[in-house]
Image (cartoon, helix red, strand yellow):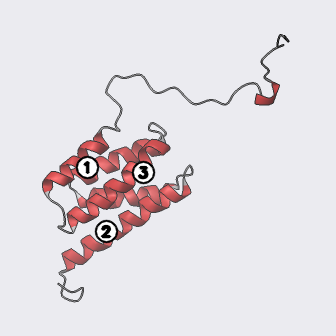
Amino acid sequence: MTEDRASPEARAAAARMDAIERGITQLVREAPVMDEAVTAELLAQLRAVGVPLATSIAQVVELVAAGQIAQGIALPHLAMACATLADGVAGRLSERELEAARYEIDTLLPLPGAPAAPDVREPDVPLIALSRGSRRQT
């Protein structure tokens, strides 16, 4: 099927997937900064897809933006999941493969009732001020 013969729905789905891939790529490239407009557009496009994998990706993106999931852990998985979603929407993957990707993304979600992860803090003392103490010379 050529681009000229594609239905309006197929063209809209392709444009949506392009926007999703551009959005997640921009978030990965600009990390640790998360542009609110890019995040909002990515979430809107994911929700418009409406499949379970897209919903799971959107949920994790929201938590990453809120600082509840570490970017360094989540962003590579999100990028892979978005590529899998694009292949699934294009019909190149089966439902089984999409469900496996959704399961992987869902493992990033915090467990209900689990304590929040501790904040990563900077040391109070500069590293240069630390010493091993006196060494005994032999």
What's the amino acid at mark 1?
A: Ala
Q: Position of residue 66 (x, y in %)?
A: 47, 41
3D distance between C-alphas at marks 2 and 1 = 19 Å
Q: For the residue carrying disc 1, how many other residues have a C-alpha within 10 Å: few (<14), some (14-19), or many (20+)?
A: many
Quadrant housing the C terminus = top right
**Which of the pair 107/127 is nearer the observer?**
127
Q: Can residue 57 be seen at all in this image of the molecule?
A: yes
Q: For the residue carrying disc 2, how many other residues have a C-alpha within 10 Å: few (<14), some (14-19), or many (20+)?
A: some
Up the image or down, 65 lies above or below 45; here it is above
Q: Look at 17% across and 67% down and name the residue there.
A: 91
3D distance between C-alphas at marks 1 and 3 = 13 Å
Q: Which residue is mark 1?
A: 101
Q: Look at 28% across and 47% down and name the residue there.
A: 56
- Determine the secondary structure under disc 1: helix
The first of marks 2 and 1 along the sequence is 2
Asked whether the beta carbons under mark 1 and mark 3 sit within 8 Å of each other, the answer is: no
Q: Name the front one of labels 2 and 3.
A: 3
Q: Position of residue 9 (x, y in %)?
A: 19, 75
Q: Look at 24% across and 85% down and name the residue there.
A: 3
Q: Position of residue 83 (x, y in %)?
A: 32, 61
Residue 50: image quadrant is bottom left
Residue 68: image quadrant is top left
Q: Which residue is mark 3?
A: 76
Q: Is residue 68 left or right of residue 49?
A: right
Q: Look at 39% across and 59% down and name the residue there.
A: 42
Q: Which residue is mark 2?
A: 16
Quadrant housing the N terminus = bottom left
- Determine the secondary structure under disc 3: helix
Q: Position of residue 46 (x, y in %)?
A: 31, 58
Determine the residue located farthest toward the left in the rendered image: 95
Q: How many marks?
A: 3
